Amino acid sequence: MFSLRVLAAIIVIVIIISLLLINFDSLADKTKSIFKNEDKSGSVGWVPGKSSGSLDLTVFPEGVFILKTDSPVNISLEANTFSNFLGEISVDYINKSIKFTDSRSPLKVDLQLAKVNLGVGLKLNKLTVSNAKMNITKDGWVKNIENGTIEVEGFVGGGAITPESFQLTGNISRFVEK
């Protein structure tokens, strides 16, 4: 009878220790993921547990930057307005030109690059920016990147294109700094 009680106690102790170790590993992994980025002075990747939320992004491209809208947007360019534009905006920062290609018609408009307001109804399912200088403010955290890559998903908000930069301000469902 004594050996059955000892055996039962040993089994219970092993189960408790196993549960503690499993939970400890999970807790250790979460702790590592929070502290894996040593630059805590504003790294967006360091914001614990937050990949969605508000985003202010300014990108300073050096070549051609292409943006594809995922819903119709009203675009203002100097004294001109394009209503319900849906398609591709190609900005050539080297030659200072901008090209609008509507996805629903053969319309293509080439213009000299000036300030372009993309309105407040801009929706982007996915945006990837590679090898560019960027200023990022996400949920109060600020980070300046000299040459980086980011991926944004589920953006809803506004935007602007200037001869020097591309800006987005709105909410996102996912943000990844690579």
Image (cartoon, rainbow, N blue to C red):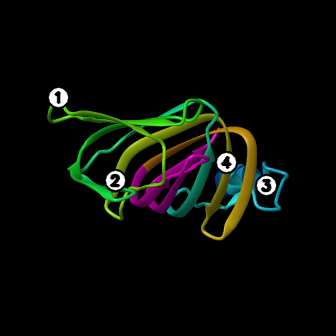
- Closest to the camera, between mark 4 and mark 3, is 4
Residue 53 vs residue 101, the one in the foreground: 101
* Label 4 Cα crowd, 10 Å radius (few <14 / some 14-19 / many 20+): many
Q: Amino acid at mark 3?
A: Phe
Q: Is residue 160 magenta?
A: yes
- Closest to the camera, between mark 1 and mark 4, is 1
The residue identified by callout 3 is 35
Is the residue 8 above or below the residue 131 in the image?
Answer: below
Q: CA distance from mark 4 to mark 3?
A: 23 Å
The residue identified by callout 2 is 123
Q: CA distance from mark 1 to mark 4?
A: 33 Å
Q: What range is drawn magenta here?
A: 154-178
Judge from the rendering whether residue 8 lies leftward or rightward of residue 98; answer left or right.
right
Mark 2 or mark 3, which has the lower sequence index?
Answer: 3
Is the residue 93 above or below the residue 33 in the image?
Answer: above
* Label 3 Cα crowd, 10 Å radius (few <14 / some 14-19 / many 20+): few
Mark 4 or mark 2, which has the lower sequence index?
Answer: 2
Q: Position of residue 18 (x, y in %)?
A: 67, 49
> Which disc, if any, is residue 106?
1
Q: CA distance from mark 1 to mark 2?
A: 22 Å
- Closest to the camera, between mark 1 and mark 2, is 1
